[in-house]
Image (cartoon, helix red, strand yellow):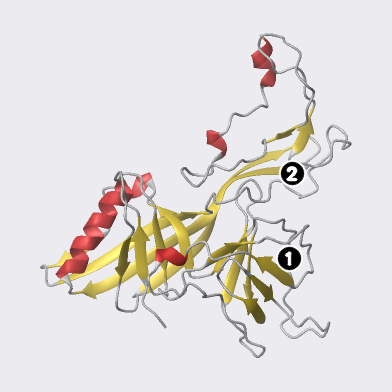
Amino acid sequence: MGSPFFTWMPFVQFPTRIFLPLGEDLSDLQVTPTRQSSDAVTIAGLHRRTNFAPGQSVRVVLERFTDRGMFRQFQNMINHLERGGYVSFGLDDTKAYGAAMNHVGPRYQGSARVEVGENLYVDYSPNTQSTYAPSGSTSAPFGEELIIETPAPYGKREYHAAYAVTGDGTATGATIDLDASSGSAVTNQQLQNDYYAGALVRVSDFWPKLYLPSGSIGSPLLTHDHRISYTLDIGLQYCIPDLVAVDVYVPPAEKEVGTYDPQGSGMVKVPQGNLDPNDKETPFIDIYDPPPMFLDKGNSLRDLADIPMLRDYKLLRK
């Protein structure tokens, strides 16, 4: 097993990735699923929920280390985080891995095979081989643990262990079986959700995009005991990277107004009128509330606040 590590790109004109291996086991690692949710209840008592910002809270604790050089690097990393930068963290620097599903057509609940493209994070650790892909095993506890997830607005996430893997982390990609293909269940692992090409498959103990919540700025993230030993205790927030347009499915145009998105998001089609503030003729299109999410090339958080909400589109016509 490799070393836990952090890595990040500094805010400079021509950045070079900084790699910080810890060289020792963590004292603790706590991971908690998070999302922001808003509930509404109708007069009839029906429940509706809107979800935002799905992710994970990742608490990394390294106690009583004595390397003053590592202390300085942690201080530099914390400054980067306080200024709004991202870092990546992994429990094993030989397994910096995440790949997008690239199959043709959806993979439905009950499927036990997914196809993925190249490893998008091979450059995040010099100790991850260019051909690395998760390994499978046909006996319990089976192979490497993986997470399959999508960003907002759906925020799906499920854990699986690889049963068999063919291919690698290069552009050729890999096929990952979660169970035996013969129909005789061995692992009893199947997809619990529907996924379209672009969903992210990553090693479960690798988080490619973490930030420091603003409420943690000024907290004692890095402390010392008489400058003899040091302790890092930092809580970071994981957001699913915006590397591809993930899981953006607009239901067919023939769907009736008021019907629900078949992905089960609870989003409702609203009637669409002329959105042009100058009252010029514009084509009629369907809007889903919240509107679909679009690729932003990973330069900012995927956040509904970044996208104009069209619920109050009538304001444009005043």
Residue 97 image position (x, y, % from top left): 51, 68
| Quadrant of the image containing the N terminus | bottom left
Crowd around label 1: few <14 · some 14–19 · many ≥20 (10 Å): some
- Nearer mark to the viewer, of 2 and 1: 1
Viewer-nearest residue: 26 or 299: 299
Q: Describe the element under mark 1 as helix, strand or loop.
A: loop
Residue type at mark 1 is Gln
Crowd around label 2: few <14 · some 14–19 · many ≥20 (10 Å): some
Residue type at mark 2 is Gly
**Residue under the point 75% across and 18% down:** 282
| Quadrant of the image containing the C terminus | top right
Q: Which mark is residue 243?
A: none
Residue 146 left/right relative to 129: right
**Residue under the point 57% across and 38% down:** 304
Q: Which quarter of the figure has residue 269?
A: top right
Q: Which residue is mark 1?
A: 192
Q: Which quarter of the figure has residue 170?
A: bottom right
Viewer-nearest residue: 95 or 15: 15
The reply to whether residue 273 is visible in this rendering is yes
Residue 87 left/right relative to 137: left
The reply to whether residue 220 is visible in this rendering is no
**Residue under the point 26% across and 50% down:** 79
Q: Describe the element under mark 2 as helix, strand or loop.
A: loop
